[in-house]
Image (cartoon, grey):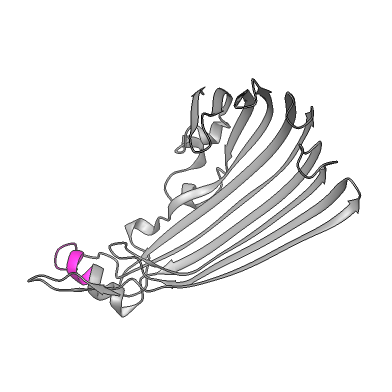
């Protein structure tokens, strides 16, 4: 916690507890290939958010990443990479702490100002990210190299907020607020050219094309408590909006002297 200082000195609750765990394993499959595995877990507990209507009681993130790599020379390019990953985050919180009631609700949102304003806000959310990627590189170290590949990614998210009266009943006509269960899929292709112009200058150019489509669960309570699904309250997600995306880039790196390097680049998306 910290204090604002000055004539209106006040205590600002901002405590938290954070724990991390990381595991990295690698195994040689052959003389020219290996399998890499990474796992990361981050957990945050009792996170007090100054100026926000609720605190986070717990947020836990788990990340898994696996790579199969073919590489003849450790100093050379990776000839083939097959990758898969999965990330998962869940969190929940509320405004039940006395510090939250004192520092936010009683100072900014008292019942005398806004009748029936909630004295507690309960939130929960969940998100995931997963995908696969494969790419191959042709060419040797210090020579022109061409990389081509493809990947697929999927992201999902959901968030709900319940606002309670002092007697524990839902206010705002019993509506739930937040983000309905939503997903996005992205299928893409990419390429990259590495061109050594001289011993001191290297040029890189490449780009990617993606097709992205989105979807929202029209039966999610966040939607149905506000409006019936037929009204398409959430547009364009309910209509499975999709888009084609593209980007391209060009960069240059020059070693001018032993101590000076010049980088430049341009991109368009």
Q: Quadrant of the N terminus?
A: bottom left
Q: Is 77 rendered above or below residue 144?
A: below
Residue 145 visible from this viewpoint: yes
Between residues 159 and 9, which one lies in front from this camera angle? Answer: 9
Q: Residue furthest bottom?
A: 98
Q: Quadrant of residue 12?
A: bottom left
Between residues 244 and 158, which one lies in front from this camera angle? Answer: 244
State yes or no: residue 29 in magenta: no
- Relative image position of residue 165 (x, y in whole percent): 31, 69
Q: Is 31 rendered above or below residue 103?
A: above
* Residue plotted at (48% across, 66% down): 92
What stretch of residues is rendered in magenta? 105-114
* Residue plotted at (88% across, 45% down): 32
- Relative image position of residue 59 (x, y in whole percent): 52, 66
Between residues 114 and 189, which one lies in front from this camera angle? Answer: 189
Q: Quadrant of residue 133?
A: top right
Q: Residue furthest left?
A: 7
Q: Residue furthest front?
A: 258
Q: Quadrant of residue 163?
A: bottom left
* Residue plotted at (46% across, 36% down): 231
Q: Is 224 rendered above or below residue 11?
A: above
Does residue 156 appear left or right of residue 227 in this picture?
right
Does residue 198 appear left or right of residue 115 in this picture?
right
- The main secondary structure of the magenta stretch is loop
Residue 224 visible from this viewpoint: no
- Relative image position of residue 213 (x, y in whole percent): 61, 32
* Label tally: 0
């Amino acid at each position: 916690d910290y204090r604002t200082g000055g004539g209106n000195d006040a205590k600002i609750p901002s405590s938290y507890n954070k724990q991390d765990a990381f595991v990295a394993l690698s195994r040689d499959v052959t003389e020219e290939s290996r399998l890499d595995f990474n796992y990361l877990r981050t957990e945050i507990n009792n996170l007090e958010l100054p100026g926000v209507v609720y605190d986070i009681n717990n947020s836990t993130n788990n990340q898994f990443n696996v790579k199969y790599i073919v590489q003849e020379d450790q100093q050379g390019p990776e000839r083939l990479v097959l990758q898969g990953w999965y990330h998962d985050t869940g969190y929940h919180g509320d405004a039940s702490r006395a510090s939250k009631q004192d520092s936010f609700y009683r100072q900014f949102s008292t019942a005398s100002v806004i009748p029936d304003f909630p004295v507690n806000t309960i939130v929960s959310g969940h998100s995931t990210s997963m995908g696969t990627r494969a790419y191959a590189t042709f060419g040797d170290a210090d020579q022109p190299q061409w990389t081509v590949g493809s990947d697929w990614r999927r992201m999902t998210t959901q968030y709900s907020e319940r606002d309670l009266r002092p007697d524990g009943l839902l206010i705002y006509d019993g509506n739930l607020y937040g983000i309905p269960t939503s997903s996005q899929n992205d299928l893409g292709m990419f390429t990259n050219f590495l061109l050594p112009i001289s011993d001191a200058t290297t040029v890189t150019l490449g780009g990617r094309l993606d097709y992205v489509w989105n979807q929202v669960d029209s039966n999610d309570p966040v939607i149905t408590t506000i409006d019936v699904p037929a009204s398409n309250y959430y547009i364009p997600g309910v209509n499975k909006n999709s888009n084609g995306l593209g980007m391209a880039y060009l960069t240059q790196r020059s070693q001018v002297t032993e101590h000076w390097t010049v980088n430049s680049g341009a991109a368009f998306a």
